[in-house]
Structures are given as C-alpha cells and as structure tokens.
Amino acid sequence: ETGVTQSPTHLIKTRGQQVTLRCSSQSGHNTVSWYQQALGQGPQFIFQYYREEENGRGNFPPRFSGLQFPNYSSELNVNALELDDSALYLCASSLVRERQFQPQHFGDGTRLSIL
Amino acid sequence: QQQVKQSPQSLIVQKGGISIINCAYENTAFDYFPWYQQFPGKGPALLIAIRPDVSEKKEGRFTISFNKSAKQFSLHIMDSQPGDSATYFCAASLSQGAQKLVFGQGTRLTINP
C-alpha cells in the first residue's frame, strides 16, 4: 500500500510569486485535504477535495486554490505569495464511503519558505 | 466554537512513566477525536481515535479517555519510552460533510532515559 506522497519536499520563493504543490493520495483513497502548519503550531485546514470538487474550506483567502484529478491526486496553488505563507503544507487523504469519512493519513509535507 | 485547546505545551517524563496530555473542545457537534504523533521533518501520523459513544479506548500503551459532559479528552501513554519523544496533536471534527480536522496547538513530549 502506497502512502501519501508530496512534492517538492522543500521550496523557496519570493514575495508576489506563485507556487504549485503536488500530492498523490494513498492508494484506495478518494478524498484529499490540505493543511498549513506554521512553525510550532498545529495544522490548519485549508480545503478538501472530493469527487474533483471543493468540499469545504477553512479561513484562507481565494489566492489559495486547488484541484483534484481523476486519479485522486491533487494540487495546491498559492498566488501572490506573502511572507506569512512560509509554512509546512500538508496533504492528507482518506476514503469516503456513503458520506462516512475514514481516518485521514498525512504526507510528510512541503516546506515553503518565502523570502 | 471551533477551537481545540491542548495542554501542556511541553512535557518531560521519565522512561517507564505515564505521559498525560489533555484537550478541551467547544463545538458539541464534534463526533470524531483523533490523536496524531509528529516527528521532526515528518507529517502527523494517526495514533488512535475515539468517537463520543465510548468513554475510553485502548490500543497497546496508548489510551484515550473521553468526557463528553466536560467536553474534554486526554491521551495517556503508559510505560513511556524514549522513542515516544515527539510532538502530539489532538484534533476534533465532524464525521459527516467535509472532515475538517481542528487541531490543538501541540505538546512536545520528551522521555528521559
């Protein structure tokens, strides 16, 4: 069973740039959620994708957007990067059956640094 | 209403001792309470989870105690080992709709040999 994989592992960008982070869900999972984890803090929910549509969003501005593909992999896009966007970005996948969610399993994240 | 408060922020326990981490939640609609373990440079790994229809769940050395009326739950690690040294996060969510996990602030646990 393949776990959740994220790429790249590290990324350095400057203010105002755009970034795309990628996630491959665990085999058999059909839902992907993205979280932002600032240093020393707990992860914060950004949004979730189910059946290729956004299925819930946290308190993040529209410059955070995403996609889910037919193979259940996902992308997180962030436009107009700000210094406060520096964080570990985590992807979690889970299986949904008849609207019942199974536990979420996390990847090791992408460390994004904004200069 | 969406907050989960976790304490303590850091904890030092001797090898073989019991580690106890506490969490409190506000939203009474939450019905799924997992605990995650995170090592440096790694993502959170699911440790154990509980639903509010039971007051306790045990898996190996890890036990969750749940108090629905007090809106509190805790993680007990029995016979703590140096390999348990990590950051622990409690979380809460609804099991229906978007499973948006609301995390506590984390507890850095150090087990001294």
Image (tube, coloured by chain):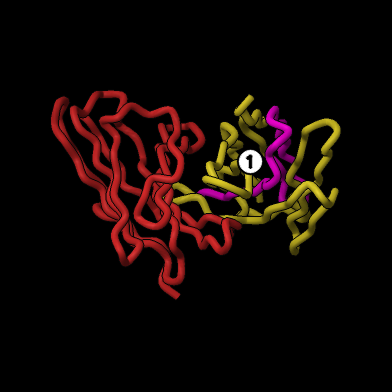
The x, y position of residue B112, in whole percent, is 65, 46
Magenta run includes residue A16: no
Q: As rendered, which of A83 and A31 lies closer to the eye?
A: A31
Q: How many marks?
A: 1
Residue highlighted by disc 1: B92
Q: Secondary structure at mark 1?
A: strand
The x, y position of residue B55, in whole percent, is 85, 48
Tell which chain the image draws in red: A
User: Magenta segment range?
Assistant: B13-38
User: Which residue: 47% across, 32% down?
Assistant: A40
In the image: residue B58, left or right of residue A90: right
Q: Is residue B55 above or below residue B9?
A: below
Amino acid type indicated by mark 1: Ala
User: Which residue: 77% across, 55% down?
Assistant: B79
- Judge whether residue A84 can be spotted in this image: yes
Q: As rendered, which of B15 and A54 lies closer to the eye?
A: A54
Q: Which of the image's four quarters has the N terminus of chain A?
A: bottom left
Within-10-Å neighbours for mark 1: few <14, some 14–19, many 20+ = many
Tell which chain the image draws in yellow: B
